[in-house]
Image (cartoon, helix red, strand yellow):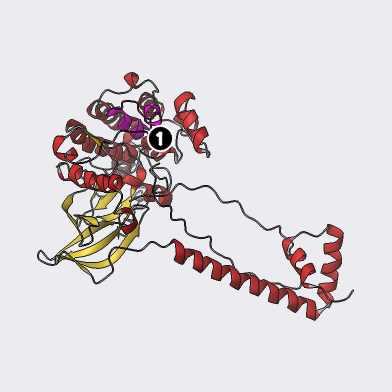
């Protein structure tokens, strides 16, 4: 066989040859130094071309930011570092020069600053959050605009991670920990609903586990940007939140949210709470169709997968989730307070005492699990009983060893305004990072793997 042509090399690398032809080429390549070098050179050239294309795509998709590290906003907030970029805005860590305080500054992306609806959502987030005094809601400290009109809001800087990030890192949560997170969330919602504010976009990515200096954690509800409100001070001068557009994150949206024009109330948030509790315990969501249209149809017409089929021993919690996921809104819990009362009753159930992990609804307790403390108490009682029996023996038994408790590691705090894996269905720019390119090389025996890899559809994230 003569040397391979570039066309043959291309077919060979694509896996497009028949088995017989590929076997013949393999035999030739094993004995031909020149053809092995040709194949290696072709692979290197393709790899470099792919890298160049990836860099070009990344550069083209990277949004222009309204501020840079070192800038001073309004003469008060010096930008220290970028924390994250979403489809609607970016968040920086900044230094309040007058108060000598670290804060988070969220700015709308310049290309959206001329969109009245987007600016209204941005303003509504600030106005809603600043009126809520609950410690379970992220605090907004200031609202303003740059010289070019780009709005910004200043928030408390939170150290920790989102519930979504915790799920990705640790997987499904213990029963008591999940119930504590949801009870804290409901406590924040009670005040919001009382002021006529419906969040409309509750999900694990909008729940943040903020770590205090003492090491304790407190749950914060974030992102009221798509909230529906009837509060006159919040809505003054803003466009209506109703209309034909779907607003929210599809995986957590109630059936009535998926029907544009239908009147919604605070019970859409309770549906989302049920979906979130389901995910905390199972690591999955009640409706998981990949296609958006199929997902919307399932939410409106099909029953969800029962939690008890995925997680054993949670029949009581599953019953509460089923109530939250009633398609008939009148059959759901009436208020956030009523739902929290049901869940708090489950927290005190005997099963909860044997579950590790806990969060205080007043501020997440330090991560010293109740289950571990209970186990140590049982061990201590066992040692006492053992000593009573062994005292009558002529030959004493050696003392039973007491296990040394192992502290549960606390995650390294990360200052961030978390980015979400599931995006609201609001028309916003989509920024998808290009797929990484894996370097390749050719050895004497070469695999003929067929090219192409499937890529899951991902909904964009918004801060």
Determine whether 326 is above or below 106 in the image: above
First to last magenta residue range: 251-274
Q: Which residue lies most toward the bottom here? A: 34
Instruction: Report the residue that reaches farthest toward the right.
Output: 1
Regarding residue 361, the answer to whether it shows in the image is yes
- Answer whether residue 264 is magenta in the image: yes
Q: Secondary structure at mark 1?
A: helix
Q: Would you say residue 222 is visible in this rendering?
A: no
Residue 449 falls left or right of residue 381: right
Q: Position of residue 175 (x, y in %)?
A: 36, 37
Total number of numbered labels? 1
Front position in the image: 326 or 176: 326
Which residue occupies 23% across, 42% down? 360
Q: Is residue 126 left or right of residue 12?
A: left
| Magenta-colored stretch includes residue 229 | no
Give residue 124's quadrant in the image: top left
Residue 368 higher or lower than 291, as above or below: below
Mark 1 neighbour density, 10 Å: few (under 14) some (14–19) many (20 or more): many
Mark 1 lies on residue:
278
The one of 399 and 22 positioned closer to us in this rendering? 22
Q: Nearer the viewer, residue 124 or 341?
A: 124
Compared across the picture, whether 9 is left or right of 314 comes to right
Whole-percent x and y of residue 106? 26, 56
Quarter the N terminus occupies:
bottom right
Q: Position of residue 414 (x, y in %)?
A: 31, 59
Which residue, as the protein is rendered here, is positioned at the far left? Answer: 98
Residue at the location (19% across, 44% down)? 129
Q: Residue 361 location in percent, x, y?
A: 22, 40
Say which residue appears at 28% left-offset and 49% top-offset. 209
């Amino acid at each position: 066989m003569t040397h391979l042509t570039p066309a043959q090399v291309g077919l060979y690398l694509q896996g497009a040859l028949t088995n017989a032809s590929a076997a013949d080429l393999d035999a030739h390549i094993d004995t031909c130094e020149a053809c092995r070098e040709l194949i290696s050179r072709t692979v290197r050239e393709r790899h470099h071309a792919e890298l160049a294309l990836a860099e070009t795509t990344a550069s083209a998709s990277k949004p222009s930011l309204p501020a840079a590290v070192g800038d001073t906003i309004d003469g008060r907030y010096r930008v220290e570092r970028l924390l994250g970029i979403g489809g609607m805005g970016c968040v920086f860590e900044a230094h309040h020069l007058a108060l000598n305080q670290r804060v988070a500054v969220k700015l709308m992306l310049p290309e959206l600053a001329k969109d009245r609806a987007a600016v209204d959502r941005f303003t509504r987030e600030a106005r809603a959050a600043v009126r809520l005094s609950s410690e379970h809601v992220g605090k907004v400290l200031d609202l303003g605009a740059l010289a070019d009109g780009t709005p910004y809001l200043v928030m408390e800087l939170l150290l920790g991670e989102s519930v979504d990030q915790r799920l990705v890192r640790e997987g499904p949560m213990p029963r008591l920990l999940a119930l504590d997170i949801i009870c804290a969330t409901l406590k924040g919602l009670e005040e919001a609903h009382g002021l006529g504010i419906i969040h409309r976009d509750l999900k694990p990515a909008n729940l943040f586990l903020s770590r205090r200096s003492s090491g304790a954690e407190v749950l914060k509800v974030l992102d009221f940007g798509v909230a529906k409100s009837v509060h006159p001070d919040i809505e003054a001068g803003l466009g209506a939140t109703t209309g034909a557009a779907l607003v929210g994150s599809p995986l957590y949206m109630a059936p009535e949210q998926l029907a544009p024009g239908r009147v919604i109330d605070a019970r859409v948030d309770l549906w989302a709470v049920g979906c979130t509790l389901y995910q905390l315990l199972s690591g999955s969501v009640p409706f998981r169709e990949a296609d958006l249209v199929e997902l919307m149809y399932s939410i409106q017409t099909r029953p969800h997968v029962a939690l008890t089929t995925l997680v054993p021993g949670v029949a009581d919690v599953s019953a509460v989730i089923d109530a939250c996921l009633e398609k008939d809104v009148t059959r759901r819990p009436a208020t956030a307070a009523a739902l929290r009362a049901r869940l708090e009753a489950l927290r005190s159930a005997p099963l909860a005492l044997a579950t590790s992990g806990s969060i205080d609804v007043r501020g997440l307790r330090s991560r010293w699990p109740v289950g571990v403390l209970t186990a140590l108490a049982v061990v201590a009682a066992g040692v006492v009983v053992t000593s009573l029996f062994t005292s009558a023996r002529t030959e004493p038994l050696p003392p039973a060893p007491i296990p040394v408790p192992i502290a549960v590691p606390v995650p390294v705090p990360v200052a961030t305004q978390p980015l979400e894996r599931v995006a609201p269905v609001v028309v916003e720019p989509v920024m998808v990072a290009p797929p990484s390119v894996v370097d390749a090389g050719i050895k004497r025996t070469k695999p003929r793997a067929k090219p192409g890899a499937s890529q899951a559809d991902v909904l964009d994230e918004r801060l």
